[in-house]
Image: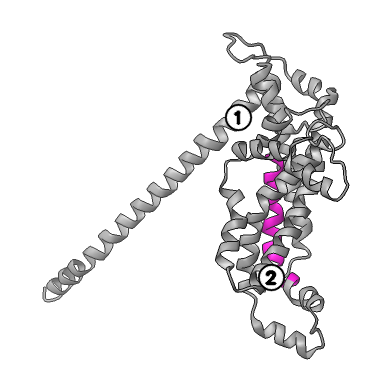
Amino acid sequence: MSESPVVTASATRRAPHTSLNQTQRRFAYLSVFSATFLLIALLFIPAVVVIVVSLTDWQLGASTLRFIGLGNFNTLFSDPVFWTALKNTLLYAVIVVPGTVILGLTIALLIESRPSLRGFYRAAHFLPVMSTMSAMAIVWGSMLHPTIGLVNRALSVFGITGPNWLRDEDTALLAIALIGIWQNVGFAMVLFVSGLKSIPEDLYHAADIDGADSMIDRLRTVTIPMLGPVMLFVSVMTACRAFEVFDSVRVLTQGGPNYASEVLLHRLYTESFDYLRTGYGAALTVVYLLIVVCLTLGQSKILERRVHYS
């Protein structure tokens, strides 16, 4: 009988702690449920809908549809325009990803080596990331004009006759890729600046003692290896953004001339909303997503083997 008050008092003291754990548990369940619901609603359900639509002949606005199986995919893989768009998208990524990484790293090194006006240079190079690409594409269209454009006027100073950048089959995709590098380089620069700040100075001192005292040796033995994780992230993210190129193509070239600048996302939009071939556009979407996932995973696996994590 004498132990009962002690047990009761002890249980009373533990009651608030138990109640708090229950509240935390309910909040955790609610958070997990909310995240799972959003993941299903915004990712899985749309993906399933796209896959189902890709197996039909539905056209946007039509009240009926017919199941045709893999008919859209058969048409897609026999369409030469699809293969041209895929080739152009891959070529665009091959130009933009290395160009963005190299130029972003170079600008980051220059900014960190010049303390004066460092904040201004960071903001100036990051500005394209914050800009609306549709509006900036119009500006670039004026700059690339064959007769009054700033680019060809600058080339004429050196006696070079500039081409019709956006209407020439040989230069249209290159011009779009250069705009892509300009758009992404600020994003890469900011990440590389953060990575440079995280490199310990002791490593540079050790490199000096070992005889790696020149700028090239310090860059090769310390800077680039230590920036491996940042470089991997920048490469993967830039590759994903490269496959999302659409605004500049839509505003400046509409995929021309003669499909010279046609890319997958613009082709997807054209088939779905210009030609109203929604089922065919859905099939193109499925193929597009599979290509992006495979290339992203493959790029990550290849680059991770060369990345040094400190």
Q: Residue 199, can we see it?
A: yes
- In this view of the protein, can residue 289 be seen by the observer? no
User: Crowdedness of circle 1 by 10 Å Cα count: few (<14), some, many (20+)?
Assistant: few
Q: Position of residue 93 (x, y in %)?
A: 77, 45
- Mark number displayed over residue 48: 1
Q: Quadrant of residue 264?
A: top right
Secondary structure at badge 1 equals helix
Q: Which residues are magenta?
A: 224-245
- Coordinates of residue 197 in the picture (x, y in percent): 61, 73
Residue 309: image tag: 2
Q: Is residue 226 magenta?
A: yes
Residue 91's place in the image compared with 254, above or below, is: below
At 78% from the left and 43% from the top, the residue drawn is: 153
In this view, the residue in front, 24 or 246, is 246
* SS at circle 2: loop
- Amino acid at the residue labelled 2: Tyr
* CA distance for labels 1 and 2: 38 Å
- Specify whether 80 is left or right of 51: right
Name which quarter of the figure residue 278 lies in.
top right
- Magenta span includes 257: no
User: Could you tell me residue 285's position as x and y percent?
Assistant: 68, 30
* Amino acid type of the residue tagged 1 in the rendering: Val
Horizontal arrangement in the rendering, residue 260 relative to residue 7 (left or right): right
Q: How many marks?
A: 2
In the rendered image, the quadrant that contains the C terminus is bottom right
Q: How is the image coloured?
A: one colour
**Location of residue 39 in the rendering, given as x and y in whole percent from the top left corner:** 51, 41
Q: Residue furthest bottom?
A: 209
Predominant secondary structure, magenta span: helix
